[in-house]
Image (cartoon, rainbow, N blue to C red):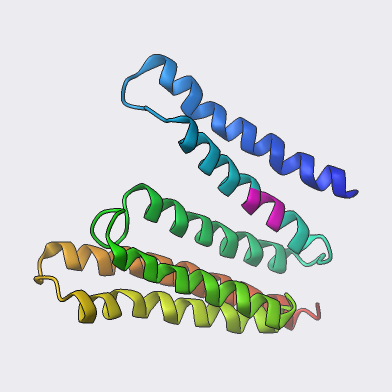
Amino acid sequence: MTLTQRIVRPALVTAGLLLVPLVAMQFTQEVAWTLSDFIVAGALLFGTGLAYELITSQRGNGAYRLAAGVALATALLLVWVNLAVGLIGSEDNPANLLYGGVLAVGLVGAIIARFRPRGMARTMLAAALVQFLVPIIALLIWKPELTLGVAKVFGANALFVVLWLGAALLFRRASSTGL
């Protein structure tokens, strides 16, 4: 597949996904996206799709492709949730910036691992650990009152930890199949 084809596919998927809120805005007041919302969402979706295409272009293993998809979808979801509503408090809470560390660990680890499955499995484990630590660090720094809201933060965070661990297991499987 050529580079142009690898760019066109995520571009078309992004355009299709962005049509959903655009059409919804015509029929309901519940959806009120601004131009900047469309630009940010488009950049996130296209960037994630293009990253998937480029990362998996040299890998034929299905477990590796699935692992890359889970990892990239988890990163996309983490950014999207933090931009939309925030995991810790509101989207304006500075504690949410700590989640940038999770993304940095994933990116730097992937580069160090040269996207090889064994190294990627370790990177996803590191991302899961950092994800687990973020609300603990936020709790220690900002010392909020312990309420049901804090429990919800830990619950939502646990979902992301499970997703990172799932990607790690898939990368581990990909490494054992001789990739």
Q: Residue at x 65, y 64 (%)?
A: 68
Give the side of residue 30 with respect to residue 124, left or right: left
Range of magenta residues: 47-51
Which of the two residues, 61 or 54, is positioned nearer the viewer here? 54
Q: Quadrant of the C terminus?
A: bottom right
Residue 63 point in image, percent of width and height: 69, 68
Which image quadrant for residue 18?
top right
Residue 172 point in image, percent of width and height: 65, 80
Which of the two residues, 86 or 94, is positioned nearer the viewer here? 94
Give the side of residue 21 with respect to residue 153, left or right: right
Q: Residue at x 64, y 51 (%)?
A: 47
Which residue of the protein is positioned furthest toward the right in this rendering? 2
Q: Residue at x 63, y 67 (%)?
A: 67
Residue 137 point in image, percent of width and height: 29, 80
Residue 97 point in image, percent of width and height: 38, 66
> Is the stretch drawn in magenta largely helix, strand or loop?
helix
Identify whether 74 is placed above or below 178. Answer: above
Which image quadrant for residue 134?
bottom left
* Magenta stretch: includes residue 162: no
Identify whether 136 is placed above or below 92. Answer: below
Identify whether 151 is placed above or below 13. Answer: below
Q: Residue at x 52, y 42 (%)?
A: 41
* Magenta stretch: includes residue 49: yes
Which residue of the protein is positioned furthest toward the top in this rendering? 27
Give the side of residue 25 with respect to residue 52, left or right: left
